[in-house]
Image: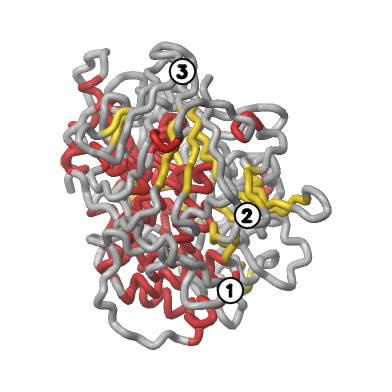
Amino acid sequence: MNIIRILTKSTMKPTCRIFLSHRNSLFFNTNYQSNIDPLRVLGSLRGIHNTHKAFRLPGSGFGQSKVITRPNDGFGSTPSRVVLVLSRVASYSTTVETRVNDKSFERIYVQGGAGVNVKPLVVERIDNDENIIGEEESRIEVNGDGVGGGHANVGNSEGLSESKVAREESQAEKEAWTLLREAVVMYCGTPVGTVAANDPGDKQPLNYDQVFIRDFVPSALTFLLKGEGEIVRNFLLHTLQLQSWEKTVDCYSPGQGLMPASFKVRTVALDENKYEEVLDPDFGESAIGRVAPVDSGLWWIILLRAYGKLTGDYALQERVDVQTGLKMILNLCLTDGFDMFPSLLVTDGSCMIDRRMGIHGHPLEIQALFYSALRCSREMLAVNDGSNNLVRAINNRLSALSFHIREYYWVDMKKINEIYRYKTEEYSMDAINKFNIYPEQIPSWLMDWIPEKGGYMMGNLQPAHMDFRFFTLGNLWSIVSSLGTPKQNTAILNLIEAKWDDIVGHMPLKIGYPAVENEEWRIITGSDPKNTPWSYHNGGSWPTLLWQFTLACIKMGRLELAQKAVALAEKRLPLDRWPEYYDTRTGKFIGKQARLYQTWTIAGFLASKMLLENPEMASLLFWEEDYELLEICVCALSKSGRKKCSRFAAKSQILV
């Protein structure tokens, strides 16, 4: 195995590395020996806009990827950097081919040749020339005007509008910006994210002092909408470094491609006068319940696309290490298993609802994020010989998933009446009640609650089980990603408007409705004292959902709903010190265990205000209906040659 030795001069203290506890330290052995000149390896990927022809990776290289940053690598803090990427790829070619006529690219060969289990090396070198935009001038000002901006306006053909309407910020917005900047986490002199909560009075922060991938998304969008892209770029690259570590819980290793739930910057003493900063990721081995996060990788993909859309810096998507990391996440999600559904099978606690709440199986939230991540990936994935099969798998999964959710998760008055009259124990390809749902499962509250004009995607679907609860995040992302039909998306907002007091109340928005109570609460939650009825995940109100509600309203042309919700939040959030969540049926009281100065509450409010001020920016963050997906029939592609396909029978509904 050939390993490249990279020597850099460092004046930065403390030094920086990835935390190695319980993990494979092979990737951080600095005693490398090689005769390969690192200056003659892979050149910069900057300035490339066409992601579909940017480069060629080793065929289907879904191996393990690590980015090793030397002490002076600040991702924008120095004019020159060298990044080493180690990829585990078995039985594939070890060449990295690039554009034929691009002089900034060269080809690297690793001894061993094709078909040998070696670790190809990809080294990216960014020269210190005049084509680097603002790297030397990119600086961090935590309490100043910005959190870096060296990459925020790179090639901004689709990015932020230069003709913003000048508007005086409200006092709530000014306070929110101050708090958001105070929550910024620094690593080796550069911003890499924001802590989950920054409550000075919290004596037991638990993991709220860490940077969560899920929680950072609204913060990232807020900075991007402000024109400050450096912190988001750093976050994407550093979390990519943490991908696919091996140790989780009880010596069990999940599939490669898993992204951590969170990470923390720790300072480790080396001797009396030296210390270093390390990134310590959490893949669920320290979390309550010890559940690995399914949604972290999906959020990472969604944020990667948003970064490119809002900054115009598409070169980040086209980097070899980023493309490899993207493929690893997709490979993990698209791996074949025993499940018969196109939706992802997950356990309780693997998403925003990270405690036992009876959402194991195929929860809507994961399916909507999965669909969004697949649509993002289809835009960003470089199409070449090594990714053709993956692109085909993405298209097939998108088609099957959209049909599955639209047809079987949708609930309105008409659908409830159909379920109410279901026949059971049907055995045939023509069965109407395909999942053997018993009509007695329809809860009594639903019959009186569902409006005449309106509907929603139910929370979960499994054999003989329908979860009729309304989960806000999944329904909002069904709108944002066009997972639902235009008619269904309109009906979801109609339902929220009709049931405003239940879903919004005194503080937007309910994470789920209704709460489970009494004996049902004891059975479903395991008597969880934090998820008591109308609290936390069990019917609590979460202000961070505001930005996603705003995005959905802008897409569907219902700005008045978003404005009403934002105005409601703006009156209370500063007075209540920006809490994590609210309790009671109408969201009237601050959550009994809610952290104050919760960062994604702050960022969600700011993102909502900025989207309402510049609604044209929202179009870069959501998707319209993709009619090409509707023409792909997975049944027609199957080897079984079955002639009957329920997709065609439901086509009239899908095309609404």
Kind of residue sitting beneath label 1:
Trp
Mark number for residue 517? 2
In percent of the image, x 30 and y 28: which residue is there? 97
Asked whether the beta carbons under mark 1 and mark 3 sit within 8 Å of each other, the answer is no
Kind of residue sitting beneath label 3:
Ala
Q: Viewer-proximal residue, 477 or 247? A: 247
> Is 188 left or right of 98, judged from the image as shown?
right
Asked whether the beta carbons under mark 1 and mark 2 sit within 8 Å of each other, the answer is no
Label 3 to label 2: alpha-carbon separation: 52 Å
Image vertical order of residue 565 relative to residue 477, above or below: below
Q: What element carries label 1?
A: loop
Would you name the residue on which mark 1 appears?
A: 578
Which of the marked residues, 1 or 3, is nearer the chain's N terminus? 3
Residue 118 seen anywhere in this rendered image of the structure? yes
In percent of the image, x 35 and y 54: which residue is there? 129
- Front label number (3 vs 2): 3
Label 1 to label 2: alpha-carbon separation: 27 Å
Q: What x and y, as percent, mark residue 451?
A: 35, 61
> Is 526 left or right of 608, judged from the image as shown?
right
Which of the marked residues, 3 or 2, is nearer the chain's N terminus? 3
